[in-house]
Image (spheres, grey):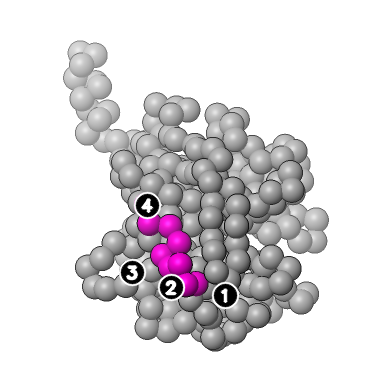
Amino acid sequence: MRWARRKLERALLREQWIVMFDMRDGVSGSPWRFKPMTPPRDRLWADPHVIYKHGRYCVFIEEFVYTRGKAHISVIEIDTNGTYSAPVPVLERPYHLSYPFVFEWNGDCYMVPESSANSSIEVYRCVEFPHKWELCVTLMQDVTAVDATLFCDGRKWWLFANVRERPGASKWDELFLFSADTPLSTHWTPHPANPVVSDVRRSRPAGAIFEHGGRRYRPSQNSGTRYGYGLNLNRIVTLSETEYREEESSTLEPKWARDVRGIHTLSHVNRLTVVDALVQRIL
């Protein structure tokens, strides 16, 4: 009867993206210590991006209700003790939204959700933190770009995104880099070395670029085995208007628990590290 029970369990298992977090000094690279936030069975939570404001962490996520066929952006609030709220929807469009990259600039909060379903890269400004956002500017139009991630090096603003150059091409393989003087510019200069990374195992962005120990790190996805399989932390060695170079510093694969099948986003702010994970559960 044991084999029959295992067969039944396998038949009932479904994959679902969840969000997990850990609070400690430095970037937490020990996912078995992370606290899971598991969504209801009718949806997934993924692509967490964190901003710290007013003494609390706000984790913006893709929330995808399966029956609706497209996702919206929600926020989960976490206090410094690790107590978290239920997600609250904050941004919905007629098209699919995901990867809610957030940043602060000149005293305002901005969000760049992935809107490749609308063939655009859009920026939203927060008018009532953290729940109300309005369209501020469209950085690029008529482009299939995924997981746009902005970074300021103190001199220029840089936009990292995977771009599909032609119909039928993959969005997983090639990382493109652009620069501008402000994050709200509508004129972004393509890097002469584009695509700056051509490798399905480490090109696609997986979270905000961060500094640790005086070095800059770019999280990226490893979809070499399958989509969203693992994570890399790549140390940025050279970032200039003529050259880009990075080196793989560490990797994270879904091997810390039997039910985990993937991990493809990491966000770190202050003492909070948040990731998503693809898990198998009985749905």
Q: Which residues are magenta?
A: 191-199
Q: Is residue 27 above or below residue 53?
A: above
Looking at numbered disc 1 in the image, what kind of residue is underneath it? Ser
| Camera-side mark, 1 or 2 | 1
Q: Are marks 1 and 2 in contact (CB under 8 Å)?
A: no
Residue toward you, 197 or 185: 197
Looking at numbered disc 3 in the image, what kind of residue is underneath it? Arg
Looking at numbered disc 4 in the image, what kind of residue is underneath it? Asp
Question: What is the chief secondary structure element of the magenta stretch?
Answer: loop
Which residue is identified by label 1? 179
Q: Residue at x 63, y 72 (%)?
A: 157
Distance CA(mark 3)–CA(mark 4): 14 Å
For residue 85, side relative to residue 202 (left or right)? right
Which residue is identified by label 2? 115
| Camera-side mark, 4 or 2 | 4
Distance CA(mark 1)–CA(mark 2): 20 Å
Which residue is identified by label 4? 199
Which residue is identified by label 3? 164
